Amino acid sequence: MAVEHFDVLIIGAGLSGIDAAHHLQKLCPNKSYTIIEQREHIGGTWDLFRYPGIRSDSDMLTMGYSFRPWTHPKAISPGDDIRDYIAATARDAGIDRHIRFGHQIKRAAWSSQDAAWTVDAVRKLPDGRDELVTLTCNFLFSCAGYYRYSAGYTPEFPNIGRFQGRVVHPQAWPEDLDYAGKSVVVIGSGATAVTLVPAIAKTAGHVTMLQRSPTYIVSAPEQDKIANWLRGVMPAMWAYRLSRWKNVAFMIYIYQLARRRPKYVKTGLLKLVREALGPDYDVATHFTPSYNPWTQRLCLVPDGDLFQAIKSGRASVVTDHIETFTEKSIQLKSGKELEADIVITATGLVLQAFGGAELLVDGRSVDLGATLAYKGVMVSGVPNMASVFGYINASWTLKADLICTYVCRLLNFMDRKGVRQVTPMKRDETPVAPFVQNFSPGYIERALAGWPKQGSKAPWRVYQNYIRDSISLKWSPVSNDALEFSNPPEASTKPASRELAEAAK
Ligand SMILES: Cc1cc2nc3c(=O)[nH]c(=O)nc-3n(C[C@H](O)[C@H](O)[C@H](O)COP(=O)(O)OP(=O)(O)OC[C@H]3O[C@@H](n4cnc5c(N)ncnc54)[C@H](O)[C@@H]3O)c2cc1C
């Protein structure tokens, strides 16, 4: 059978994959594309995670697409509404017709001879057998997220096998889990734990959040009053743009303040927690992290729901270490014991780049850990490939939108210049930092060795700054000395980078 060929192959039909398709349709209307999605639905993260209370922890005015207003009154939004928003975006633009569901990409091999990728995917047949599906494309655009879908991360807890209650990871929430009236222990202190605890506390007997160390937690209004008001007095798109810039500016201000005056921000954040929980609560033990604000992602709780659950007595926080599991409880290093019917391990994700696909360039396997990230979008030595990795200090989509625009600019530039291959070349630039810097939750640290690194200067730095990235990805010339443009041998033998750099000036 003839192998199907596309100009662009997008991996993943999540928030970023639909964003990529939208940009391609708008900015590169002559490009053919397909989206390969391993699951049976659109939405990625927002379809996979089904635990009670699942919601965004950044505001949807910045997490929505730049081109489609978020019109729900809740800015911190339930997961279902985010999934519907992504699916509606795909449906309205006919993007859904380009998606091949149930195909997991296993391998992508670049050939410089053909200036093309050969992509191998596995499709599950109705009878359970695997079918190999091979496609080719000129440009590979990975929108596969950043973590493994098959299972989350669970540490090796001593004797967890002895525990007779149910142990559940939020990434695989069982539909039949009945926690009404039960004693539930949630292990973890990140965004998932602080979302789960108040949601479960509504009907559970009692919920204990068991954490090794505290996280910064800040209450924010679930509804953005200014955004909702603006929507009433002007067209939805104008109101959305204004609200988006308001929130971007506020976020940049807070982040910069936290980095420049960490003590001041720390004192302010802890004061808010004290006000929410009352003067008798032990904020020092349970809500005062040892690190400075924003060296790990700050957790947002809508309208202080976590604090309310604690104040009502339906939930509590224990800061301790696990000694061992018994049949009915968790014994802690302090000697305390937590009885539980259900234990929820909100202990994180397993990071995974490019959807776990093996990458080869001209027959050689790519060692991602030895590469440098170009503008946080491409990888040194790997031609015609880009990927989306959003912000860690702001909404993912802000960067996803910029990356999608950049990829379209790059493709159009190559068409204009008549070149088929672009490769970031690190030359004498050396790695000086991991892909994600100044941000160290365990699940990120565990995986960063195998990810592309950052160099010492632009374009080899990965910024967490929307303004800087807008300049770099939207407004700077596409061509520069770090990109080598070329054609396959039969079309042209000489790299065109210098010539193109001249042309771009
Ligand atoms: C619980 C949770 C809450 C979050 N909350 C926020 C938030 O509030 N704000 C924020 O900005 N970010 C948040 N994030 C980060 C979040 O992942 C991004 O917001 C966004 O959903 C990422 O979209 P994506 O499309 O890039 O990746 P994903 O949503 O992960 O989608 C990737 C898609 O690629 C598919 N795929 C992966 N590998 C393959 C393969 N080999 N073959 C075929 N298909 C593949 C997947 O099935 C999936 O559909 C959260 C993450 C989690 C886990």
Image (cartoon, rainbow, N blue to C red):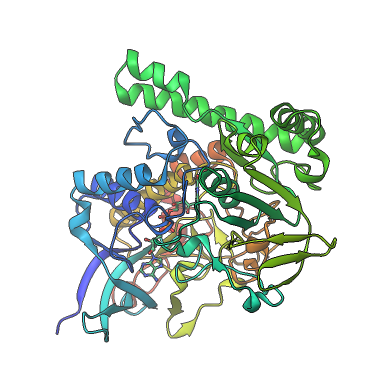
Q: Is residue 412 visible?
A: yes
How many numbered dots are placed on residues in this image? 0
Image height of 345 relative to 410, above or below: below
Residue furthest to the left in view is 1
Q: Of 337 and 47, which appears nearest the observer?
A: 337
**Quadrant location, the N terminus:** bottom left
The residue at the point 25 percent across, 80 percent down is 133
Residue 116 seen in the current view: no
Indicate the quadrant where residue 4 lies.
bottom left
The residue at the far top in this view is: 233
Q: Relative to 327, is 466 above or below? A: above
Side of 480 where 273 appears, left or right: right
Where is residue 368 drawn, in percent x and y?
56, 72
| Image spot of residue 282 (x, y percent) | 81, 39
For the residue pair 303 and 161, the one nearer the viewer reads as 161
Residue 435 falls left or right of residue 365? right
Q: Quadrant of the C terminus?
A: top left
What percent of the width, then of the height, locates residue 309?
Answer: 61, 38
Image location of residue 72, percent across then percent down: 35, 31
Q: Residue at x 47, y 58 (%)?
A: 498
Above or below residue 216? Residue 383 is: below
Which residue extends farthest right? 334
99 in relation to 207, above or below? below
Report the residue at 33% width, 58% height from top.
13
Front residue of 465 and 93:
93
Q: Give ligand 1's quarter of the image.
A: bottom left
Depth check: give the residue in front, 126 or 202.
Answer: 202
